[in-house]
Amino acid sequence: MSACLPARANVQRRNDAKIIAFFIAFLLACCGLEATAAGPGNAPELMGVCATCHGDFGQGGARGEYPRLAGQSEKYIAKQLQSFRARKRINIPMFPYTEERELSDEDIGIIAGYLASIRLPTALPVFKGHEDALTRLQMMEKVMIVPRAEGDIENGGKIYQEACASCHNKNGRGRGAYPMLVGQYTNYLQKQVSSYRNGERPHDEEDSRGILGTLQDSDIRDILAYLTSIQPRD
Ligand code: HEC
Ligand code: HEC
């Protein structure tokens, strides 16, 4: 047990440093000390505090405990941050970061646009030979391929195209307020489906909880397996 403590203290210190950096950026933005502070150029700084959990490139982590945000729809990200702040969608780990004084509407807009614009390759990089070790490491770290999940891909595809594609897109990449599902961690998607089915999170205004509620557990598993099988290779 005690062996965990130093590691925890390190994480805490890292968190503290990121929170302080976030506040400094925030103060600069408020006081107008830096012309670019409130512009999109500030996004990587705002993102610093999120990176502890969601990764430096918004690629998520801890095998889906922290969802991927990179490449997710801008409108959807902004809507979720507003929901967390209004406590309509409960997210305890993120609670301190979405308080009004931490995350203004303007910051939400900046972060959502920034995260939506990050492209994570799904193919291993081809090195040109002149990259240094750090550049190579960063290129490798950006690659995001969700491991194939087990299930009947054919059945999953059939149900997905009939019941989900009208909103989440035929290719699973979402649009507007409909989130992308392809390229997202399977564990995370499964957790969200469960919370929709338990009525803990509203799925859609048109009550598509109805759709998720009519499916067998095995159908959900098959849909999630299908989603991991249609990741683009680029
Ligand atoms: C302490 C860890 C932690 C930090 C820091 C954090 N998040 Fe999160 N975030 C989470 C967790 C955990 C979830 C998933 C909650 C769930 O399972 O419903 C999440 C979910 C989200 C979602 C919803 C994703 C989806 O697909 O619905 C968004 C958007 C998000 N975070 C954005 C951010 C932004 C922007 C920041 C920085 C301002 C941030 N997070 C900081 C832990 C964190
Ligand atoms: C009528 C439109 C509609 C249909 C059909 C639909 N969804 Fe959704 N789905 C949504 C919306 C809107 C959201 C975002 C809800 C929110 O803002 O919290 C969502 C969110 C989700 C999420 C959470 C994603 C995340 O990043 O947290 C999952 C998982 C999901 N849907 C799965 C499905 C599956 C599986 C099906 C088919 C069985 C389906 N949905 C059908 C509209 C729809």
Image: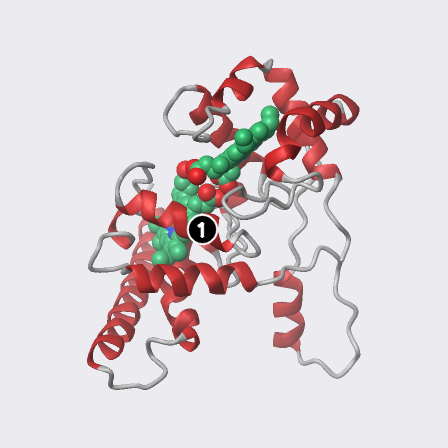
The amino acid on which the numbered mark 1 sits, given as a three-letter code, is: Ile
Element class at badge 1? helix
Residue 32: where, in percent of width, then height? 24, 83
Residue 8: where, in percent of width, then height? 33, 52
Residue 38: where, in percent of width, then height? 33, 75
Against 46, is 112 above or below? above
Asked whether residue 151 appears in the rendered view, the answer is no
Quadrant of residue 223 within the rendered picture? top right
Against 48, is 55 above or below? above
Quadrant of residue 86 within the rendered picture? top left
Is 150 or 221 nearer to us in this picture? 221
Residue 131: where, in percent of width, then height? 70, 80
Is 95 placed left or right of 212 in the picture?
left
Q: Residues within 10 Å of mark 1 (few under 14, many from 20)?
A: many
Is 88 or 142 nearer to us in this picture? 88
Residue at image coords 79%, 25%: 154
Quadrant of residue 196 within the rendered picture? top left
The N terminus sits in image quarter? top left
Is 10 placed left or right of 40 in the picture?
left
Asked whether residue 35 appears in the rendered view, the answer is yes
The C terminus sits in image quarter? bottom right
Q: Is mark 1 within 8 Å of ligand 1?
A: yes
Residue at image coords 59%, 16%: 217
Q: Residue furthest front?
A: 206
Is 16 placed left or right of 110 in the picture?
left
Mark 1 sits on what residue? 77
Residue at image coords 75%, 41%: 230
